[in-house]
Image: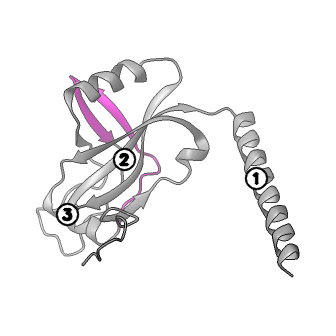
Amino acid sequence: MATKGKGKDKNDGRKLVAQHKKARHDYLILDTYECGVVLTGTEVKSLRQGRASLVDGFVQIDDREAWLHNVHIPEYAQGTWTNHSARRKRKLLLHRDEIDKLEVKAQESGHTIVPLSLYFKDGRAKVEIALAKGKKEWDKRQTLREKQDRRETERAISAVRRRQRA
């Protein structure tokens, strides 16, 4: 139960199932969207066990519908003949205007739509997808260099502050 005067919970009731960690390294994220996913019962049960992989996943728009491809949700261990196939394509639930915007932007050269994370929010499975542009090798190195520089300056600042306190 939330106490009076406290801010919202940090994760807003989200239970993270899977995350595509290399996506932010491999792509320049231009815009993000949260969308629902059409799943079968055994897929939901498998996700509740925390089993999924977004590594090879991508989103494709066909006939003004968004589809999630190559996301691996393993078969539910206690499932019977009703079990799902692990890499089937899954329909994404987005507003029509969001789909139209994504379709136009994704057709530009070098742009793609990738899943960033898969989670439960208020009991519903959600996917955070991003409109992204692929980074070149030198972009990746430059990003790493900037990250290291930022860490070094933070360390130097904290060392100076520690010396001032002593």
Q: Which residue is mark 3?
A: 123
Cα–Cα gap, marks 1 and 2? 27 Å
Q: In front here: 166 or 64?
A: 166
Specify which label sits upstream in the sequence, 1 or 3: 3
Which of the image's four quarters has the C terminus?
bottom right
Which span is picked out in magenta?
Answer: 51-68
Cα–Cα gap, marks 3 and 2? 15 Å
Mark 1: give few (<14), some (14-19) or many (20+) Cα within 10 Å.
Answer: few
Task: Give the total of numbered labels.
Answer: 3
Q: Which residue is at 27% across, 61% downward?
A: 120
Specify which label sits upstream in the sequence, 3 or 2: 3
Q: Which residue is mark 2?
A: 128
Amino acid type, callout 2: Glu
Amino acid type, callout 1: Arg
> Residue 146: x and y, percent?
76, 45
Q: Which residue is at 32% across, 59% downward?
A: 119
Q: Is residue 107 left or right of residue 142?
A: left
Cα–Cα gap, marks 1 and 3? 38 Å
> Residue 62: x and y, percent?
25, 25
> Residue 165: x and y, percent?
83, 78
Of the two numbered discs 1 and 2 in the rendering, the one whose residue sits closer to the viewer: 1
Residue 63: quadrant of the picture: top left
Q: Which residue is mark 1?
A: 150
Magenta stretch contains residue 53: yes
Q: Is residue 141 left or right of residue 156?
A: left
Q: Is residue 13 above or below residue 33?
A: below
Residue 133: quadrant of the picture: top right
Q: Is residue 133 above or below residue 58?
A: above
Specify which label sits upstream in the sequence, 1 or 2: 2
Mark 3: give few (<14), some (14-19) or many (20+) Cα within 10 Å.
Answer: few
Q: In front here: 60 or 80?
A: 60
